Image: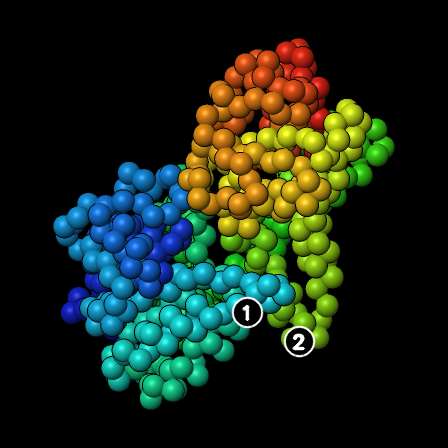
Amino acid sequence: MSGETKLGLSNKNEIASVGIIGLGYVGLPTAIGFLDAGFNVWGVDVSERVVEIINRGENPTGDPEINDIIPKPGTKNWNITTDTREAVENCEILLVTVPTPVTPDLKPDLKYVISAGENIFKCISSNSGKIVVLESTVYPGVTAQSWLPLIEKYGLKEGVDVHIAYCPERFNPGDEANGVRKVARVIGSLNKEVGEKLVSIYSKLTVGRVDYVGKIEVAEAAKVIENVQRDINIALVNELARIFPALNIDIEDVLNAAATKWNFHGYTPGVGVGGHCIPVDPYYMIQRAEQVGIPAELISAARAVNRTMPLHVFSVLKEILYTNEVPANNSNVLLLGWSYKAEVRDHRETPAEHLALALNESNVNISVWDPHLENDVYPEYVNVIDDINAAEGFDLVVLVTGHSACIDIDWGNLFTRMRKPLIYDGRRVLDIKKLDEIGWKTYAIGKP
């Protein structure tokens, strides 16, 4: 097909216009990246609110790294709309960066991928050669299984009227070193010529290497196992953080000792993992393994460990309160941090919510201070602290998120306003020795 393939190219055989479908944590930085790379960009989001905010030159996401780079109103080649048809008509290539969550019963939820495909393919004309690329994280086979029936539904033929491909996003919110213009990318497609064209396109977006890896399923699988691997590694250290205290061993001492070996990969334990990737993507791989009759035992076990970490920490906190003669139903606990990750406003799948819910169900009074979040994101049972310097009357402080603002508060000042000076470091980022010197009674995850 390489000599006959119809591609949606401009006169100079270059892709000039790129459409980004979905302007969230991944889509918006991707759109800005292509604009910076010299492309004419059409950004589409179903949310009128998101479109209005972006068109004001403001940031609707929780990633502070893009606060100062949102294009100003009237920026040349910057077109933001809720109308997918506009993007399809004006762009040779369309990238889909929509959410891929899981359902309440932890099954892959592909409705956004299917809806985006529906909205795109119904607007494509025959023999247009448009290229449609899925970037959302999925299990192997989703791109073809979700989109080929839609292409057929609208009377189109893949490889003639439209081409589909997969290039997994690797954007890491809050991580300037691994932004969309720096990370390596991989591309899978049904057609080698399309794949090579996409290598050329993405090479203008990023300084990282861009590889055509052949089948779409290879690229899909590569993305999902990247996050599965992290989930497994984090689960190992979280499980050890449960075991070693029972052996009167501090996991931090063990990790520091093990790190002296050249090939040891260091991870740290925590209250839990959050965000839209690591707590979600393994379920996509688990589902696909089940479909082909192969049990994903290691992946499932790791997910179970990480999913239950907030409950483990809850049990430890209950023991701390009990040991220090603080009745649970008359205790005041302050959580420092609510977002799932340090220095971002993203609270999707945050372990803080699971921990807070367990505490609330034990009649513990819960307050939260997170300088990165607005007050309307919390559950009703949580008391929001606006000024940490005025917080008082607490029995236990729990560091949940390693925001620098949470780590660097005036611990001496807060100490004088505690009812009980108890603290639990849920991220192993505090200076325990300094806190001990102030007079705090310190506890930490993985510490006896």
Question: According to the image, label 1 marks what residue?
Answer: 140
Residue type at numbered disc 1: Pro
The quarter of the displayed image where residue 268 is located: top right
In this picture, residue 20 sits left or right of residue 184: left
Q: Is residue 242 above or below residue 256?
A: below
Identified at 52% across, 61% down, the residue is: 101
Q: Quadrant of residue 121?
A: bottom left
Q: Which residue is mark 2?
A: 292
Residue at point 62%, 42% (across, down): 356
Q: Is residue 82 above or below residue 252?
A: below
Identify the residue at image location x=49%, y=69%: 110
Disc count in the image? Answer: 2
Residue 334 visible in the current orientation: yes
Residue 300 as seen in the image, left or right of residue 194: right
Q: Amino acid at mark 2?
A: Val
Residue 177 disc label? none
Element type at mark 1 = loop
10 Å neighbourhood of mark 1: few (<14), some, or many (≥20)? many
- Tell me residue 261's x, y (percent): 70, 33
